[in-house]
Amino acid sequence: MQDTTLYQSILGLTHPWAVSSVELNESSQTIIVRVDYDRASLTACPTCGKAVRRHDTRRRFWRHLDTCQFETRIEAEVPRADCPEHGVQTLQVPWAASNSRYTELFETRVISMLKVSSLYAVSKTYRLSWGAIDRIMARGVQRGLTTRTTINCQDLLVDETAFKKGHDYVTVSSNRDGQVISVEDGRAGLSLFACFKALPPESTMHTRSISMDMSRAYINAAYDYFGERAKQMIAIDHFHIAKVLTKAVNEVRKSELINLPHHLRKECHQTRYGWLKRNSHLHGTLRERVNALAKMMQNTGLSWIFKEQARAIWYGHAANAKAAWDDWLALIEVSQIRPMMTAAETVKTHLNGIITAMRYKVSNGLAEAINGNIQRLKTRAMGFKNKERFKRAILFHFGGLDMTFHQER
């Protein structure tokens, strides 16, 4: 097989494109593959497809996959079509995307390695600058976003993640499949609203829940985008309610601590984490010590029981949830334990969201896991100076995007 025929087959070229010559330069360790466009063939306008006059040609080069140890480049005189309606335009070559200096096969290989290796390793392997790699990644993400038509938006999850120190955040929206579906600057209401706007409208029509923390900005953004539907969609994450209740128990414990005999204060301090544990996690000596103190710290013991009752309601039957929470709220009101009453007000304010989370058994646990993966990505990359690159990297690694070229043809 001749070298021209070999590369014709490797590149998958068909008429009117053909490999005319292959030049090996041992001193520079390069191979130049020259490709010609058949002059007898008609020149079609890239926009309308009509046969038009050929205006001129422009010489262009593309980096291709290496041939053994030799860097391989493609060279071609690319015709420009002169369309009366759309003006002078360069023809699209079959081996590379528009405005790219690399062939599709080369970019595909770089993207595949980027998914499992560091940017530094890819740079060394393919002898590319970090900027060139970033542009390849950007084109891949853009292809994936452009070709993404339907997304599983039945249950959405919302969380923020830190870009860098100094309260600089981005808002990340994902789904129950573990797929990041949008990333926007900041953690304000406008940030979440922009995340919703980035979703296909036909997908959000089927959204039934949006798991989030108790951020008023996020809640308002959900109402701004979904209207009154949001009332039945917002699902308050269990972790944040549990955090409010354990904080209240700890405040009650600290308030009763000062009234204990001096010899028991150290014991109370040493068992402080026991009061924050759930009942099933209290074992052995720690359970005995907490039970003994509860007899002298009645408000703390009662507050701990309220916390455990709330946990039992959350994991109980959603059909009876409203009545169970109402009874729980009434008991706390009777107790007159101030920190628990404050926590109960928070529960009452977000009761609809709590019941929605119970009904659909949703939480932000998966979003927190994605957040952890994002932070590990940031550590591996030794940080991101540019927020756009940070957002792009999140979508690249966790967006589940199809970044192949076959859908463009």
Image: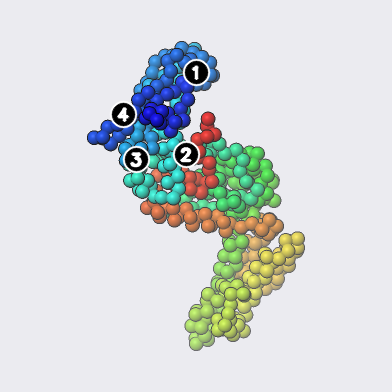
Q: Earlier in the sequence, mark 2 or mark 3?
A: 3
Q: Is residue 16 above or below residue 213?
A: above
Between tags 4 and 1, which lies in front? 4
> Exactly how many numbered labels are in the figure?
4
Q: Which residue is mark 3?
A: 68
Residue 140's label in the rendered image is 2
CA gap between label 2 and label 4 equals 31 Å
Q: Quadrant of residue 289?
A: bottom right
Q: At numbered mark 1, what does the secondary structure look like: helix, strand or loop?
A: loop
CA gap between label 2 and label 1 equals 26 Å
Q: Earlier in the sequence, mark 2 or mark 1?
A: 1
Residue 45's label in the rendered image is 1
For image coordinates 64% across by 42% down, the residue present is 203
- Residue 85 in sight in this render: no
For image coordinates 56% across by 68% down, the residue present is 247
Q: Earlier in the sequence, mark 3 or mark 4?
A: 4
Where residue 202 sits: x, y (%)?
65, 39
User: Quadrant where the N terminus lies?
Assistant: top left
Q: At numbered mark 4, what does the secondary structure look like: helix, strand or loop?
A: strand
Camera-side residue of 395 and 105? 105
Q: Which residue is mark 4?
A: 23
Q: Earlier in the sequence, mark 4 or mark 1?
A: 4
For image coordinates 54% across by 19% down, the residue present is 48
Q: Residue furthest left?
A: 27
